[in-house]
Image (tube, helix red, strand yellow):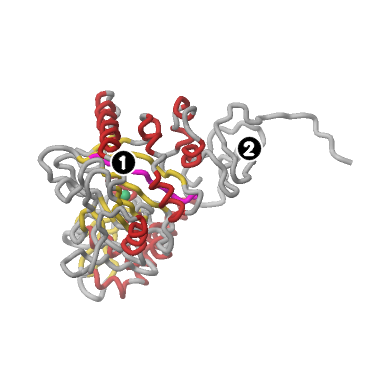
Amino acid sequence: MAGVAPGKTFTPGLDFSGQSYVDWAKKRDDDVDQAHAIIKKKLPLLGQLNGVLSLTFGDRKPVFLDARTNEAKLVEEFDGEPTTTLHMKPEYINQFYQGLLEPRYGLFKDAFFHPASMPKGNIPLAIKFADLLTPNPPVAPKKVVPGAFPRLPQPTEDLEQVKKDITEFGYALFKNGLTPEQNAILKKAVQEQAAGENKAGVGQEDGGGSNQRIWTLINKGEEFIDFLNHPLIDALVPWFLGEHALIHSYSANITRPGGNAMQLHTDQVAIQPPIRDIAFGLNILWFLEDFNEQNGGTRVFPASHLGAVAPEDIFSIEGTIAAEGTAGTALITDSRLWHATGPNHAKTGERPAILMFFMRSFIRQQENNFLSLRKDVEAKLSDRVKRLLGFYTTGALGGLEGEVREGIYVSRKDDCVGTLRAEHTPRS
Ligand SMILES: [Fe+2]
């Protein structure tokens, strides 16, 4: 792994530390040179940006893309306030250029651990700059304004309509999936778990100020194990993702008054290189309270799941619509759909939801169930739930000690074959 030094060497004669085929200092220089060369090559296109970008690659001093006129140029000095300031790894420029990294992911992904890499100033300009470097810059999704869409998905109990809506709009609303009694059981479990986690000091904030996330629901009560028997899963997940889809994550979120909107994203944004031709996941978000525009109903760009489509500003929900429905409704989304948790403008109450997020079986799961599943919970799980969590071989994947024939349940084994040495006798 580049950048991660070899650990301790155990075997005399097998010490590879200190050896490298790559001159890393030279590579950093080459990456910066390459970034500059790509930007220069794209200058005729970048002239449309209408602004000045300060670009800092790694620990270099900034260079400036002066694109105030159609004659854009890359210069070493700029007197004045840049429209946008970017700090990034130089190799990202090449990855944008080759279509290997989605700009809305690449520009922001490092900021979580390195706040200095957060783009500053005019953010849409930063996104447009990176888009223009890509082989196929996206177009903005169609905004929801009067007359833009002859129809939009409405809550329905008709599963064929649900499938049609997912196909056409990238989302659907399935109503009355829970009876009021079932809804009350799950809502109580989520709210009490949230309170319990806060009381124990392990509550997790979910971007948006007052919002809370409860991860790894599988460990957090039998209600959540039972909920995985809901027939909506069987009706939609194999249809959409094939027979071996896995739970990518199983969580709840609660938005509360004052909670901010989350940034717009797709649910497959972390899958890079970016692939828009196929949906990798399906999210089933259960409303445990009535969802509406006021209390943070999920914002979506209808039909934004198809084609090279991406919003110009991931921090603006203008042009989106709030998913609305009564408690017990499920919002089902294609993982390519652009969406965000909505801002919660309500004065009181809270808006809890359960998210069952499914992905095709060859994608690494968001939650690492193999490490997090409690032993006492594992002992209770049905074969159905074990399969959904990934404790089952699919195709030639997921085997234990090489056994990968399809259809085998696997579980943690404490006595996998380890070092077993015997005198080696060459065969004659
Ligand atoms: Fe999402």
Kindly indicate the quadrant of the structure image that contains residue 84: bottom left
Is residue 33 in sight in this rendering? Answer: no
Which image quadrant: the C terminus?
A: top right
Mark 1 highlights which residue? 354
Who's the residue at 80% across and 33% down the image?
424
In magenta segment, residue 34: no
Who's the residue at 60% across and 46% down the image?
406
Q: Secondary structure at mark 2?
A: loop
The reply to whether callout 1 and callout 2 are in contact (CB within 8 Å) is no
Q: Nearer the viewer, residue 211 or 232?
A: 232
Disc 1 or disc 2, which is closer to the eye?
Answer: 1
Q: Residue furthest left?
A: 347
Mark 2 highlights which residue? 401
CA gap between label 1 and label 2 equals 35 Å
Left of 149 or right of it: where is 282? Answer: right
Q: Which residues are magenta?
A: 352-362
Kindly indicate the quadrant of the structure image that contains residue 339: bottom left
